[in-house]
Amino acid sequence: MPRTVRRHIPNILTMARGIMAILFFISISLYRYPDEGVGWLVVATVLFTLAAATDFLDGYLARRWQVVTGFGRVMDPFCDKLLVLGAMICLAGPRFMVPEWSTGAHLVSTASALTPWMVVIVIARELFVTSVRGMAEACGMEFGAKWSGKAKMVLQSVAIPVVMVLIAAAPPATHIWSAWTIRGVMWAAVAVTAVSGLPYLAALPALLHGPNKA
């Protein structure tokens, strides 16, 4: 395959992820827990899974073919955050609220077990890491992705569709095992996300005392 063609494939996959993220938001907005538009929740789950798969594929191809571009460096993380943060915001929203009268509702307030404060932690981590990376680049320092950040992305990409499948197939308000599974999966995802920010926090003192300190 000509290099001129290979150069564009990772970027096409990145843009496809952005488009699938938008279609995901449309689909999930047509669902309401527990049984309104369940088919749309299935569609949303498929879209999220395909979009998450392109995240791993575009980066792999760009590195293997040595066609990393400035466009990809900007749009790849943007589309990642659009997809994952958008999904978490939707899952913590009113369309996934568990009715108070439902059996087992005392275990969860939302079918996804996500609450606003959990989403705030995830968003705060992303904003913090982005700020630290920007500071590192301004100081002329290499500051690539950490292994913890990659583990975080993998866990989020698995946890979100797994939780959506459980919500559709075994509503947590009426299936206690499903409620506990969803809670465990989501709490693990949020915890790993928070911990993945620690390496960037540890690197902050060196950046603050760097040669380009204001």
Image (cartoon, grey):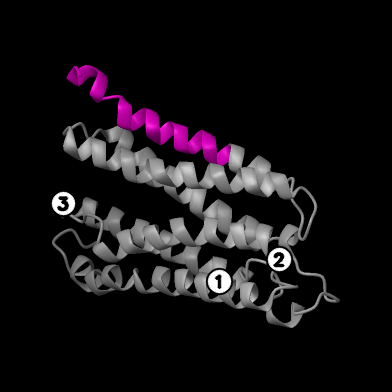
Tell me the residue that label 2 is attached to: 171
Tell whether position 166 is magenta. Answer: no
In the picture, the disc for residue 118 is 1
Quarter occupied by residue 164: bottom right
Q: Give the range drawn in magenta.
A: 1-22
Residue 155 in the figure: left or right of residue 175:
left
x and y percent of residue 57 in the render? 32, 40
In the picture, the disc for residue 129 is none
Q: Do tag 1 and tag 3 residues touch (Cβ < 8 Å)?
A: no
Depth check, front residue: 165 or 151: 165
Cα separation, mark 2 vs mark 3, equals 50 Å
Name the amino acid type tagged 2. Pro
Neighbourhood count class around disc 2 (C-alpha, 10 Å): few under 14, some 14–19, many 20 upward:
many
Neighbourhood count class around disc 3 (C-alpha, 10 Å): few under 14, some 14–19, many 20 upward:
few
Tell me the residue that label 3 is attached to: 140
**Magenta residues: mostly which secondary structure?**
helix
